[in-house]
Image (spheres, helix red, strand yellow):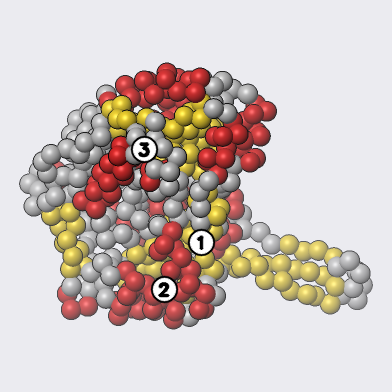
Amino acid sequence: MTTNADERKVLEAVPTGLFIGGAWRPAENGATTTVEDPATGEVLTEVADASPADGMDALAAAHAAQPGIAALPPRQRSEILYRAYQLLHERVDDLAMLMTLEMGKPLAEAKGEVVYASEFLRWFAEEAVRIDGGYQVAPNGQTRFLTIRQPVGVCVFVTPWNFPLAMGTRKIAPAIAAGCASVIKPAPQTPLTMLAFAQVLADAGLPGGALNVINATDAGAVIEPIIRDGRARKISFTGSTPVGKKLLEQAADKVLRSSLELGGNASFIVLDDADVDAAIEGAMVAKMRNMGEACTAANRFYVQRGVVEEFTAKLAERMGALKVGRGTEEGVNVGPLIDAKGRDKVTDLVADAVANGASIAIGGTAHDGPGYFYPPTVLTDVPADSRLNHEEIFGPVAPITVVDSETEALDAANATEFGLVNYVYTRDLNRALRIAENLESGMIGLNTGLVSNPAAPFGGVKQSGLGREGGNVGIDEFLETKYVAIGFSG
């Protein structure tokens, strides 16, 4: 167990049970699981480990709460979200510490995530009172059309460990705004942040049962019965493409509306007319945000020959200057990866690239000692068929491949089954628009390394997912449109 007094105080304040029907309770038969500090490998605490029966209790609670949350006036739903937004800011230090302890990211980044997560609450608090409908005259003038937008119903959310608060608020906020009750299963590596957030929503006045939180190590056994039951009407998942496909198959059984934010394989294109210094700044954000453990992380760097030497040297210098350590320590820029499996994958991907001809400009060797650390790494001359160019790295590794033309860069960027985001650096407006229109992805970072924003639609194409989260279309995923034909005699 960690012994730091401040850390223990934060950990001890977090409820560790299941949150079902507005109350905290243990799992069936008292089952628990441990939460680990990835920086030390030590156990932080234990939390309830839900069974399939617990999952069905959570679904029943959400189903019972659905009529009530749907009937709440939009302004009341909005005010609950806004109070939760305020509470996140009041509790930012404790929430950030909690996130750093269970996920590993440096405290400064964790505070940034709390603020980012809170913006989904504020944005959808504003959207809650703007749900509209319509009235129109039929073309023949003999009927009137009335359209009503109503909540889709009970939602099931499955969220990942890399952004344990923001990935939750991105789903929960629009659900509440639309009037939907929900069941959420956070990642077993990082349940504490979501458990703390459930208490925030309860303190903000969310009715019991409108949000139910079930941590479960056997996710498939718990979630599949909920999906196949018939009382849930929507599934929203953020995570890997293979798991997303499996959930989509299950959702087809009851024709659940599905939103899937899946894997990414983002390219980062630097053309010979780019502002190289600006590209370096963007690369540091796109690659190193969250230690590279992000679906939006730059995964493949395609740099035109005329600027590759300068770009590589500057990127290696910046990456090499980053301080690696436990996220609670002063001045740390790069925390640990989430677990041994994640670190081993990064190690294997780098070894494969080097074995096939890539060179290490900086980094490239896992740290000794406790914790799942991997140093910021830059590789050059990475072969096009390297695993690094085809698999999501989820770590602080920047593989650089030289290209000779815009066309070569574009073809390489599109040569993947994924299509979440791509980044492009160029000073030529026509070139920028031409590339942006031809890149096969749901989002483009044009001369910027950051695309995520609660006010913008987030999502991908191809095997990177279905639907959009955020922006003024984000609430649409939680609403059904009902049409009423009205006879009219004039």
Q: Indicate which disc residue 259 carries.
A: 1
In space, the residues marked 2 and 3 are separated at their CA atoms by: 35 Å
Against 181, is 29 above or below? below
462 lies left or right of 431: left
The x, y position of residue 233, in whole percent, is: 51, 73
Image spot of residue 171 (x, y percent): 45, 57
Q: Disc 2 designates what residue?
A: 62
Query: How many numbered marks, from 0 up?
Result: 3
Which residue lies at the image location 54% right of the left edge and 27% below the top edge?
A: 404
The residue at the point 28 percent across, 65 percent down is 215
Name the element at disc 3. helix
| Residue 4: x %, y % from top left | 9, 43
Query: Which is more N-terminal, label 3 or label 2?
Result: 2
Disc 3 marks which residue?
A: 289
Question: Mark 1 Cα within 10 Å, few/some/many (few <14, many 20+)?
Answer: many
Vertical position of residue 57 compared to residue 217: above or below: below
3D distance between C-alphas at marks 3 and 1: 24 Å
Mark pair 1, 2: CA separation: 19 Å
Q: Taking the image as drawn, is residue 207 in sight?
A: no
**Which of the 4 image quadrants contains residue 52?**
bottom left
> Mark 1 and 2 residues: CB-CB less than 8 Å, in contact?
no
